[in-house]
Image: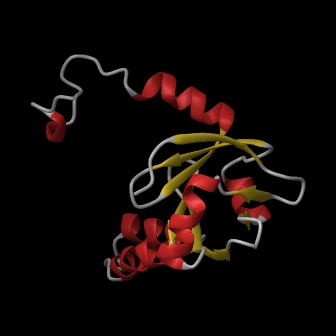
């Protein structure tokens, strides 16, 4: 559904203009209702609300006595915020989430199929430089035999 990367700017109030190529899809799929949350990689995840709900339900069923499960629940559900696109196709990103992901002005919105990732532009560039630098034997087993 969502693919590609877009270099964007946050305005002085922390609003992000969703690129026009995604607006109609988001309006049709979720009436512009989105969920923003923190990601362990220090970016934000942007979900259409119907895509977020099954994930939230699964997270809430994780064992509460498992420390890693609780930490993940605190991060993802604890930071989740419902937002709506305004008539200009913008969403307001709260100061808390902007601070978590170190979003200032220049950001990258990266399609990930059913969701987007929202990165500080400099952090996106840095992680891109290291993301695909595998040494011998480091390739995840799921990618063995995968070809493009």
- The image shows residue 25, relative to residue 63, as above or below, that is above
Q: Position of residue 137 (x, y in %)?
A: 18, 22
Taking the spot 52% from the left edge, 31% from the top edge, the residue there is 127
Q: Position of residue 56 (x, y in %)?
A: 42, 77
Q: Position of residue 112 (x, y in %)?
A: 42, 51
Taking the spot 32% from the left edge, 82% from the top edge, the residue there is 61
Taking the spot 73% from the left edge, 47% from the top edge, the residue there is 103
Q: Nearer the viewer, residue 109 or 30?
A: 30
Residue sitting at the far left? 145
The quadrant of the image that shows the C terminus is top left
Q: How is the image coloured?
A: secondary structure
Residue sitting at the far top? 136
Residue sitting at the far right? 12
Q: Name the side, left or right, on which 100 lies relative to 11.
A: left
- The image shows residue 136, relative to residue 41, as above or below, that is above
Q: Nearer the viewer, residue 31 or 108?
A: 31
The quadrant of the image that shows the N terminus is bottom left
- The image shows residue 85, relative to residue 143, as above or below, that is below
Q: Name the side, left or right, on which 119 lies relative to 145.
A: right
Q: Could one spot residue 75 in this view of the protein? A: no
Q: Could one spot residue 53 in this view of the protein? A: yes
Q: Name the side, left or right, on which 39 lies relative to 148.
A: right
Taking the spot 47% from the left edge, 74% from the top edge, the residue there is 29
Q: Which quadrant of the view contains residue 95?
A: bottom right
Q: Nearer the viewer, residue 93 or 1?
A: 1
């Amino acid at each position: 559904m969502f693919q590609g990367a877009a270099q964007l700017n946050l305005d002085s109030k922390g609003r992000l203009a969703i690129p026009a190529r995604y607006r109609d899809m988001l309006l049709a799929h979720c009436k512009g209702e989105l969920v923003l949350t923190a990601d362990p990689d220090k970016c934000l995840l942007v979900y259409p609300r119907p895509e977020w709900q099954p994930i939230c339900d699964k997270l809430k069923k994780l064992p509460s006595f498992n420390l890693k499960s609780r930490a993940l629940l605190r991060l993802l559900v604890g930071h989740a915020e419902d937002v709506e696109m305004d008539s200009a196709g913008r969403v307001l990103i709260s100061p808390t989430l902007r601070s978590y992901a170190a979003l200032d002005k220049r950001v990258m919105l990266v399609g990930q199929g059913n969701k987007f990732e929202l990165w500080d532009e400099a952090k996106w560039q840095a992680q891109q430089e290291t993301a695909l630098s595998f040494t011998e034997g480091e390739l995840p087993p799921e990618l063995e035999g995968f070809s493009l």
